[in-house]
Amino acid sequence: MSVEITLTLKDIMWFLIGIGAIILIIYLVVLLKNLLQTVKKTNQILDDTSVVTNITATRATEVNGAVSDFAVSLGAVANSFKGNQSFMSAISTLVNAIGSLKSLLRDK
């Protein structure tokens, strides 16, 4: 009892194409798995960036107010030297501005 198997070149080529297709499918599954992990990490980074942007915007607004107060105070001191305002009023405005800057820096 002898069993003969006949393989043609066409059969061998189809077999190799099938093996290649299976390897390609496995590769694509691994690629998609890695891609999903990358997308998740990217979303986490974007969420963190959003938080940092909000904090930065809040701090910039606070600093802008403090700098504006400080500029007004310095202007008041300059005007007091010109005689446009009382010296004590200018000093108290300057002290208030420095106090607001100090409290702003202490909040950090």
Image (cartoon, rainbow, N blue to C red):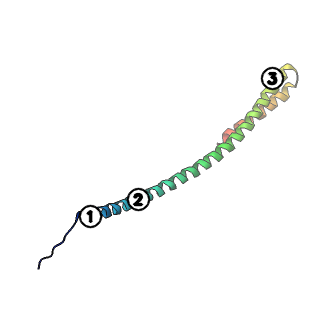
Q: Which residue is mark 3?
A: 78
Q: CA distance from mark 1 to mark 2?
A: 27 Å
Residues 31 and 102: in front is 31
- Farthest residue toward the left? 1
Label located before the other in sequence (2 or 3): 2
Q: Secondary structure at mark 3?
A: helix
Residue at image location 46% in from the left, 55% down from the top: 35
Residues 8 and 99: in front is 8
Label located before the other in sequence (1 or 3): 1
Question: Which mark, residue 28?
Answer: 2
| Mark 2 neighbour density, 10 Å: few (under 14) some (14–19) many (20 or more) | few
The C terminus sits in image quarter: top right
Q: Is residue 48 above or below residue 83?
A: below
The amino acid at mark 1 is: Lys
Q: Mark 1 or mark 2: which is in front?
A: 1
Q: Secondary structure at mark 2?
A: helix
Question: Which mark, residue 10?
Answer: 1
The amino acid at mark 2 is: Leu
In percent of width and height, residue 13 lies at 27, 62
In percent of width and height, residue 81 lies at 83, 20
State left or right for residue 106 relative to residue 8: right
